[in-house]
Image (tube, rainbow, N blue to C red):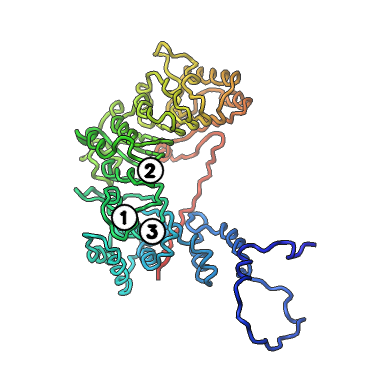
Amino acid sequence: MLSSKDFPPLPSQVQRKSRPTKKEPPRSEGPPAATRRAHSASLNDLPDELIVEILDYLPGIDLQRFQLLTLASLSLTNRRFHRIVVDRLYSTYDSFFCTPYPFLRTVMCDADIASHVKFVSFKYGPTVHSERPPYVPSISDKQLIKDSLRSLEIPRFDWKQWASDCNDRQVDQELLYATMLLYTPNIARLEIDDGAPVETPGKLPRWLSHFRKIANGVDLGGVHRFQYLKSIRVDVQYLKLRHLAPLFRLRSMRKVTLVGLFEWTSTGETAKEELRRLFPNRSSLIDELQLEMSFVDDDLLNVVISGIKKLKVFRYWSSTDHFEVSGRHSDDYWGISGQQGYEPYGEIAASNSWFSMVKSLKSHTSLLETLSWRDGIHSEDRNYMGALGFLSGFVKLSHLEVPLAVLAQQPQVTTTTVESIVANLPRSVQFLTMNMIHDGRAYYQRCLDYMAWYLSENPTSLREVKVIYHSLLTPPSYNWEKFGNLLLDQGILFEFVHSIPEEEADSEGNWAPYGAGVSSDESDSSGYEESLYSD
């Protein structure tokens, strides 16, 4: 039979036993031993390592299993539990769950707690969290804000006005979030949903102003310089690349994700020249760039890509919606053409050339590992034409996602044959995703047939192939099961997905993805909001 002697003590148990204990006076004789319980234990008797394992079942910031209040209660139990729980309790700040002022007050008055904050996510705008009652700061709260801002000793900084604005009952939430960033020196990941209603000429969000000053080497006194910030995601509103350029210049930054970005050459005749100044050649140290639901003109995209020294991951998911040219009237950013402030244009003008994009990536052929382009701008193949031989030069490219039409070139080019998919596919690719955005053509199906045959006769690095059909229409009549079985015989996993665009599905009242490996289960839970660290 096993006993406690068979298990060596854990490090935390050894540490606790090694602490000197005070000699206690002899206890008075208690009740007879028979009346005592033979065994008694509580959570406090467990070793730190086991408590940490238990805490894995108590996620703090989690929409489905919100346990932040449970962690807060544990933290208040005793000093030991606080020491164990504090990192999980304060590692994440999300404005969806927590009001900003109490959290700001906490990180201002306790540098140790502030050092635990690694991930910050916030959203601001005129109607964001408008249902929450405004936090009313006490006199001591206001004094703490003033004293803390003054102690930063930032040159040419009106700390009195800044503190007064923070303590205003109608304070702009973005100001509180920007101030919070000044006190979280170990932040590694940042997500921002910019909900500003309209661009104010010459005025940037305060959080972005911080980054601009740091990128320009401005003296910020006792404020940290985001030495550990590696990833940022911004859901932009009116912001443009010229505003966001400082994010690319942070020495610690490795991943930049921009959502809803629109860069159109008609927004300014000197746009390209201005971007070249803001994105000097090979100056940025980021290695991952992701553009979601965005459109960036080919020439401007080339400037940004050229400004990155070593690009390993590039994802560009272009949008099909109407974009706003002026950058204003942001309440309807994806506005309807014909409205005041919007400039309609055709799909031919507002589309990217695959040929141009790959040419821009040419300087990263020896480094690029992931290339993903989801082209939602149009369903025609006019801009896919041209030799794609450069892809063979991407010797480290292991993840590739492109429209099927990119690899299966149309036979209008005399040199194109059914071998095009295989010929255009780099040998290093292990995971291949091909997107279909139309009903499928017989020529593409012949290319897929040849691909399946070729892979059965020749060794390949491919481990997984996925075909995604983006349409409300019935998938094209092709024997996907046979195609998948041929790949499976070579040890290559295959998945066909019928993905219904969300905006189209909403109009039809039907959102049910179809295909292998796709789950249609959607959570009904909308979550709830809690005000943490409040009085």
Classify mark 3: helix, strand or loop. Answer: loop
Quadrant in which the C terminus is drawn: bottom left
The image quarter in which residue 9 lies? bottom right
- From this view, report whether residue 119 is shown above or below residue 405: below
The image quarter in which residue 246 lies? top left
Residue on which disc 1 sits? 127
Left or right of 181? Residue 37 is right
Q: Residue at the location (34% across, 53% down)?
A: 225
Residue 449, numbered label = none
Residue 253 percent location from the top left of the image: 38, 45
Q: Residue at the location (45% across, 35% down)?
A: 500
Residue 399 percent location from the top left of the image: 49, 32
Indicate the amino acid at tag 2. Val
Comes first in the chain, label 1 or label 3: 1
- From this view, report whether residue 534 is shown above or below residue 213: below
Indicate the amino acid at tag 1. Thr
Q: Residue furthest bottom?
A: 28
Q: Residue at the location (23% across, 44% down)?
A: 328
Residue on which disc 2 sits? 256
Q: Residue at the location (24% across, 38% down)?
A: 277
How much space separates mark 3 and mark 2, taking CA atoms?
Answer: 20 Å
Residue on which disc 3 sits? 184
The image quarter in which residue 491 lies? top right
Viewer-nearest residue: 488 or 426: 426
How many tags in the picture? 3
Comes first in the chain, label 2 or label 1: 1
Indicate the amino acid at tag 3. Thr
Residue 130 in view here: no
Foreground tag (3 vs 2): 3
Left or right of 178? Residue 434 is right
